[in-house]
Image: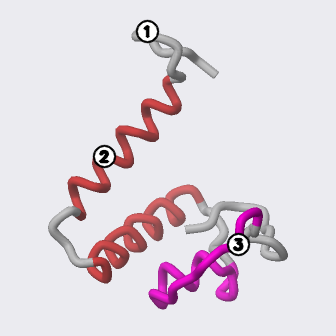
Amino acid sequence: MKKSEKGRIPVALRDVWSWKEAVYRETEKMNTAEALKKIHADADAVRAVYDLKEASPTHPLRRVAEEGVEYKTRPGKNLTEGHEESGAAS
């Protein structure tokens, strides 16, 4: 992993931080439903460009995003347990 010129923070991590900030700025004035709809539309566009697989309809994190269901975790509980897939999830 390449290191940034400004210190010991990897360039990839800086890129992730920049992306997260951009998403926040684009969605900060939206309500949760609008923000999730935009994020999903953006994810669908990326998935189409890179021909990525879509997450299983029963994947817990997909249900949270699409249905707005709330979830609670116990310490050490893995939300994706039993739902491992190759490819990216939205």
Q: Amino acid at mark 3?
A: Arg
Q: Circle 1 sits on which residue?
A: 5
Please name whichever residue, 82 or 72, is drawn nearer the observer in this view of the structure.
Answer: 72
Give the labeled residue for mark 2: 21
Tell me the SS state at disc 1. loop
Which label sits in the foreground, 3 or 1? 3
Q: Amino acid at mark 1?
A: Glu
Say above or below: 66 vs 87: below
Q: CA distance from mark 2 to mark 3?
A: 29 Å
Tell me which residue sits at (63%, 73%) in the image: 54
The tag on residue 74 is 3
Camera-nearest residue between 36 and 79: 79
Location of residue 33 (image quadrant): bottom left
* CA–CA distance in space, label 1 to label 2: 20 Å
> Quick check: 73 left or right of 90?
right
At 46% across and 11% down in the image, what residue appears? 7
Residue ID at (60%, 75%): 61
- The part of the chain drawn in magenta is 56-76
68 to 11, vertically: above or below: below
Query: What x and y, as percent, mark residue 82?
Result: 84, 76
The tag earlier along the polypeptide, 2 or 3, is: 2
Q: Residues within 10 Å of mark 2 (few under 14, many from 20)?
A: few
